Amino acid sequence: MEPYEIIHKAREQGRSNLTEAEAKILLSFYGVPVVRESIVADENDALEQAGTIGFPLVLKGMGTNLAHKTERELVKVNLRSDEEVRQAYRQVRESAGADWEKCLIQPMVEGKREFVAGLFRDVQFGPVVMFGLGGIFTEAIADVVFRIAPVTKRQATGMMEELSSRKLLTDFRGEAAADREQFIRTLMGLSQLGMEHPEIAEVDINPLIVMRDGRVTAVDALVVINEDDSAVTDGAPSETEAEAKERVGTINAALDVMTHPKSIAVIGAKRSQGKLNLSIFDCIANFGFSGNLYPINPNVTEISGYRAYPDLRSLPERVDLVIISVPAPLVPQALRECVATENKNIHIFSAGFRETAEEVGVGLHKEIETIAQEGRLHVIGPNCMGLYVPASNIVTWPGASEESGPMAFVSQSGGHAQDFTKHAHNSFGINVSKVISYGNALTLDGTDFLEYLAQDDDTRIVGMYLEGIKDGRKLLRLITAINRTKPVIVLKAGLTDSGARAAASHTGSLAGSDKIWNAFFRQSGAVRVDSLEEMAEVAQALLHCGECSGRRLAVIGSGGGISVAAADECSKVGLYLPDLSPELVTKLRRFIPPAGNMIRNPIDHHSMFSDLDILGHTIELVSEESHADMFVISLHLDWLHEFSGHDESDLKRIAGYIATKARTYCKGKPLVVSWRQYADNPETHQWSAILGQALLQGGVPCYRGLSRGLIALSKLAEYHESLRANK
Amino acid sequence: MEPYEIIHKAREQGRSNLTEAEAKILLSFYGVPVVRESIVADENDALEQAGTIGFPLVLKGMGTNLAHKTERELVKVNLRSDEEVRQAYRQVRESAGADWEKCLIQPMVEGKREFVAGLFRDVQFGPVVMFGLGGIFTEAIADVVFRIAPVTKRQATGMMEELSSRKLLTDFRGEAAADREQFIRTLMGLSQLGMEHPEIAEVDINPLIVMRDGRVTAVDALVVINEDDSAVTDGAPSETEAEAKERVGTINAALDVMTHPKSIAVIGAKRSQGKLNLSIFDCIANFGFSGNLYPINPNVTEISGYRAYPDLRSLPERVDLVIISVPAPLVPQALRECVATENKNIHIFSAGFRETAEEVGVGLHKEIETIAQEGRLHVIGPNCMGLYVPASNIVTWPGASEESGPMAFVSQSGGHAQDFTKHAHNSFGINVSKVISYGNALTLDGTDFLEYLAQDDDTRIVGMYLEGIKDGRKLLRLITAINRTKPVIVLKAGLTDSGARAAASHTGSLAGSDKIWNAFFRQSGAVRVDSLEEMAEVAQALLHCGECSGRRLAVIGSGGGISVAAADECSKVGLYLPDLSPELVTKLRRFIPPAGNMIRNPIDHHSMFSDLDILGHTIELVSEESHADMFVISLHLDWLHEFSGHDESDLKRIAGYIATKARTYCKGKPLVVSWRQYADNPETHQWSAILGQALLQGGVPCYRGLSRGLIALSKLAEYHESLRANK
């Protein structure tokens, strides 16, 4: 039977599981090595087959209603004689009772190492392949990893390397290393099965036994098929390539208009309350928007010197962007007006929809969703801050920087859009090309904005704050592609509310959303960060540092305890401090005075304060003669303050030197500075800002504390590793 | 045979291992459930014993030189007939070759779940007991936990709960829950064995099989004995209780004199270079030391107005504290002078000894060690900053706070002593009772300072920065005791250089130093922190918050994304956000306006800015009617700035309200504030400091960022959990 026929037959019979025998036939079509086996219908048949297969062997009950075979004592192993086979047959038949149909008889596959492989469908990511430690330990130990299908050979290999118990795949207690090719074929086969047969809900192959000689064999398998036909479209593209291209083209064109509007109407525009608490309308007006700006408010004649209009219909033109800022119950009417007046590009600022999780809000959400879809509106929001584009002079909140920069930020949270951009600008001088806060994602979702930013010449790097996503597969595909030329940094929130997942097997139940997002990050190469602060720190490294060819770090610094701390911090983030060779130490000793200076890695020397050439020469020598792939200069500002005789110009001189000369000496390898400061000395309050600014001008990233610098460097290394792997 | 005889016999025979049979006899003395077994010397004997034991059974080769029995195919399992026993016997005999002595025959113990238990000796902590997932997976999965002996029943129970694979101890796939009492007896027995028999170097019981009915049986065991007699003293106290008490009394008296000196001599006192770069002598003089201060320097007649003396002999008195600050090569002579003049209390500031890891330094170290020991000197250092005691007006660095406070800090790093005290004072208003920076610990070690601080009435809380320790068991004993009344916070550095450990078994090789330090923290109840900053943050919570009865947290805050972030952060640190009951939500709704406010947990409402009574009433209701054990108020200073109409007095009013009224409303449960700020508004530069200060006055800890606040609260919860567990 062909795969389709096997599945079709089961579905016709109204079954949700394939039998074990059907499952193995299906899986062997997809390259999974399964144990050869025979179906036997009576005792004599069993004895005859036993003679053909040879002892020891295994006999199992078989039947469409037989699950939990081990617990029901329907699996008899290690049968070594006709008599044992006969007894086993009778016992199984009795234990199975009315559920009994036939028996399976197969050779006893022996091996100490058992793995599990599987497939299930995630609500966001579609078919997902699983691999892990199998046998009875699967659930108790939960050493399992995931990849979103389609799984490439490299990814299948990566799954094996990611297992904590990967040692079991090598030579093990006198047994040969596992045949990795068989595992790779199995994982890629499961991926292909998942892609080709949306009717397959779950597959659970457990155990996959590694035999003494390293060969891999599946001795049991569970295949669950969808009972519900509606699920069957899952995984299949809902539109043709041409349709998709057209849709993307339309959306990109719309977003291009919205981010460079020549005219904006604000429905529900209000006067600000005094000079504080600026209204959205005044935020835009104050930010220097030079196009036509129309406040829509039937109750006033003007706002901030702009003539007010009672409704969209009264406007002299169709506008490039409509911002809706009326209470939620009035939004449907406003949207209908947009449809009627053919104003299609809309940002809904108003909140009070699905996010309230209350009946009224959810109802309103459905209503505006229908209006937007039928009217083919391009909607950013609702419940969001919309657009901040310095080059177009648009922003909806006060206090935003007017400078344009290379980073785009796409955020589901409006608060985060404000916080991140302020923080990145103030702390690291990072400015933005476009910021899109999109809240509930009524029509336009994160993936649409990514498509747009992918081809936006003003954007060199993309940050993203994600709570959820409608189409995880699309997100994966897009970020994987964009990340090759524009690094994508993602802060994924809400990992802990994975929610319960109904599942008939290990595969589904072990797939917490965090583990699948782990797979997402490994596959896409997106840089994962833990906070907005970390996003800015990593962005700074990605913007200013060149390629990072490895994870070996040299630290040059000063201050107590730095050596011990550096080793601990490196080990936390997966960086290494290579030893310096005795030859190199001898060379360094020639110009680094011995008193109070340690020449190891970290190199702890204070002389850099007194003679900068020593610092430069150190970097140059270490860059040439050690195996360091990157550098950190660690400064203790309190100490620097003392050593420099409290002289601010000394700080500037040091910062300037590092920003220009030291950077040259490191020969293009990443170089960052980390600083510490504990004293509360009025004279040094501004020192960190002065240092940061001077370094920034020379393109040297600067971090508060060694730990933050090392995290940024490890993410930089990770990004370049993923680039090399995806070449 | 008694345990002593078994060990004695092996030692007499020059063996480093007990035989499997000896090992089992020894272990069964200590309560380890071992499989009953027989030693057989020939084939007929084997068949006869097989008849007595019954099938299935196991036959193993036995011999003093037989290791790696599985790999050498010397273990035959599941033998079911006389014929199989006969064959197995012959095969084993042949495989063992010249190493063969006898065979062991035992019933086949069957169970799906295999554990490992063991004992080994750590160089710092002495006998350490291990428990973990056993069988063939022990090394590949390394799910093992440790406790430093002696292991109490509660600690043995804790070891089981700490295993990742603890699910295997419960009902499992039709097999009964493991008999925990048997495991507890085994672990406590290993502990007792380790304490009573220092000759035992290692024990490795693997597997400890859990049978179908839950009973536990050890089917194999390895016992390694020390070949070297010098190791045999390990674990035994080197002094009597009375001797120890006298020693502690002497040291405490000396430390009391040193921390409250009436006279200090500084050997190698120098003039400061200008007003900057203060010398140690000037640091003390400037800090207002009111006792007799003697600079010792033969080349000058006075320093800073103090008459200089050429040497200790010339002083008019014996001094309470001698500080030695001469180059390392001159330190031995200075120490000899101390001995000659009976000046016994010494701080050696000078560096250049063992820490250089160079021959000259190591040699000098040995020299001064001998002088100090022979002269019965009390030495703090060398290579350290010594003492900082505000109440006695002594400190050796510039910029220290003159205020006394409740926290002592003991630090191996002098840099950290300065950094921590400045940071704790500046950021959290935490001042110190005594700071001891002790560097290389020539005679006085961290444990000595702890003994002193334990009985110091000025110290309510102790911080400790540790790189290494001479006597880990003493440290454990001391901290466990002190921690009951004075919380001890420890920053342990240098966890990653665990170094290779020669080991004949799993037990030793799996014991990375980090895992043993984990055991140390669990057993002592000391609060573990990751950085100096975290130490100050946690100290603030411990100083100001009362008992924390659980890990359920209510967050009341404002600002975008706080709900999602709070859930993620809580899950990272093991805190919980209990749902609010519908009744409670209804009550809160009565006075929290619906617009823009979410009544969940976190409760996200802006109205606290406009009407503080709403905030107070919220806390009061949640404290009474939810299950929250503690509270965080999360403030977004940028938003507060806007909502308050940029009015600083509003901030002060809010801070004051929280510090007094809100704290009352929370009914003694811990309450902390976390703040965020991203805008770089000159008006708000000082807002966080103003907030912090106002809260501090009311004893409310204040943290930058939710994450830092939650970490501090989780450590507070951890501390009180350990107090309750140790009651």
Image (spheres, coloured by chain):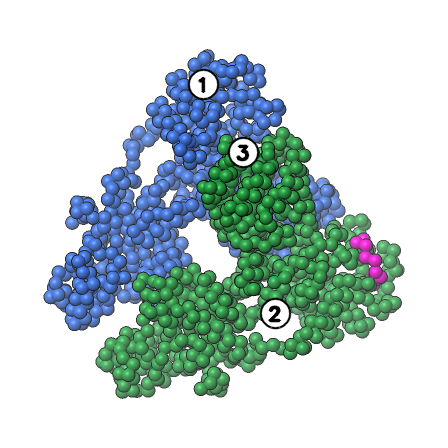
Chain colours: A green, B blue
Does residue A595 sit above or below A578 in this rendering?
above
Residue to which mark 2 is pinned: A474
- Horizontal relation, residue A235 to residue B107: left or right: right
Q: Chain of mark 3?
A: B
Residue designated by label 1:
B319
Residue A535: which quarter of the image? bottom right
Q: What secondary structure is marked by label 3?
A: helix
Residue denoted by label 3:
B418
Q: Nearer the viewer, mark 2 or mark 1?
A: 2
Give B267 or B542, whichever is nearer the viewer: B267
Tell me, yes or no, whether the two marked residues, 3 and 1, touch with CB atoms within 8 Å.
Answer: no
For the question of whether residue B505 can be seen, the reply is yes
Image quarter hosting the C terminus of chain B: top left
Image: magenta residue range:
A286-297
**Which residue is painted at 61% across and 69% down in the image?**
A474
Judged left or right of residue A208, residue B234 is: left
